[in-house]
Image (spheres, rainbow, N blue to C red):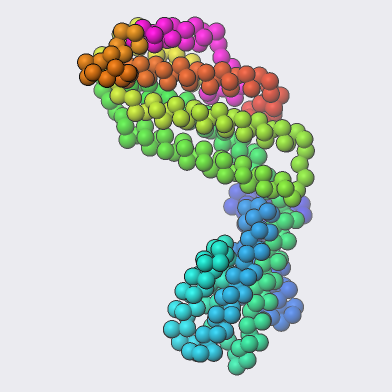
Amino acid sequence: MQMIHSLAKFKILGGRTLKTGIAVFLTALICGFFNLPIIFAVITAIVTIEHTAADSIKKALIRFPASAIGALLATSFYGIFGKGALTFALVAMLTIGICHKLKLDDGIIVATITATAMIPEFQEHHIVSFFIRLGTTSIGIIVSTIVNFFLLPPNYSPMIYKNINALYNHAGRLLKRIISDDIADDKEKNRGIQKSYRQLTAQLERTYQLSQYQREEWKYHRHTNEERMAFQFAQKKLGAFQQIAYHLGNLQYVQTKSSDFSDKEKQLLLALTDDYVQVLQDPTHSIKEEQFQRVQQLDDVFWKWKEEHVQQQTGYRHHLPPQTILIYELLCFHDVLEELQSMSYKQNDMVQKCYLKA
């Protein structure tokens, strides 16, 4: 067991890769002991290892009936058409179609591979072959599910903490880029910024997916109260980041130019952006007093813009100019940072343990 854990730390051989290899080894060993065909069981074992024990159990309950349908179709069409090309085509199409109709989608790959691979191996007693193939497929499903449940249970929390740190760092760089571009004379804009924003949101989705994996895993494996609290704090930070991503998404579409702001306003925007970046990239999200002072100045600028420019020559009485939108989004951004500071201060020990080491 110690050797397995040591191998799992080696980057090429991750935990899931090792579990796949062990499941294949045990499956082949069992089939060889009972003198059963190995290939079908091994194929099933390879594709049945999942991210979590919960997924493995749920999908095993789907893959068994799907494999039975595939094997039955293969046996039936072999009895009618023999080993011709038509048999392969009909078996593949009907296995996919029937499994989909019965909502056995997670078992389609296993069932289709098993069914088509059975056809060249049929012996004269093809009914016996049906039960043998179904039995070996079941061995692969059962063995891989047991291995996935008991061996090297995954812990996604360190990866979640690392991703959260990376998300906040990425957000800081993106915010700096957006604001610098919004008040610049020469625009380097949109494609690069939009690409960076898409990467940010994709990473956020992946982190939410890891969080879901961790929740599912804890249904079947024990975890400490400290681990639960750290995970809950991570979810709060992800929730706050969702708001940050929303404001960044709005800011990237604000159309302003250098002449829209006075030199003093531009200096204020750049200085406040630097403050925001520092808070975002600090795992404890501490806000300095200077930032509160600058936010107050920006708030004064906002009400000035709103009062002087809210009614435009276009005739839209409630139309807000882009300058006002940009300032408003930055003020909202500060509100989120205050929430972050508050929650991080309350959970300082958690921050030190989980995020500063991530």
Corner quadrant of residue 129:
bottom right
**Residue farthest bottom in this picture:** 124
Looking at the image, is 316 positioned above or below residue 90? Answer: above
Q: Main secondary structure of the magenta part?
A: helix
In this view, the residue in front, 328 or 165, is 328
The range drawn in magenta is 279-305
Residue name at image x 60 percent, y 19 percent: 341
Quadrant in the rendering for residue 267? top left
Question: Does 298 appear in magenta?
Answer: yes
Quarter of the figure with the N terminus: bottom right
Residue 204 image point, x, y percent = 52, 38
Name the quadrant of the C terminus: top right
Across and down, in percent, residue 335 comes to 52, 18
Residue sitting at x 63%, y 83%: 130
Residue furthest toward the left? Answer: 313
214 over 32 or under it: above or below: above
In this picture, residue 157 sits left or right of residue 334: right
Q: Is residue 291 magenta?
A: yes
Q: Is residue 25 visible?
A: no
Q: Is residue 294 left or right of residue 316?
A: right
- Residue at (65% x, 77% y) in the render: 134
Residue 119: x and y in percent read 54, 83
Is 56 placed above or below 226 here? below
Image x and y of residue 54, in percent? 68, 53
Instruction: Say whether residue 14 is visible.
Output: yes
Q: Camera-side residue: 150 or 21?
A: 150
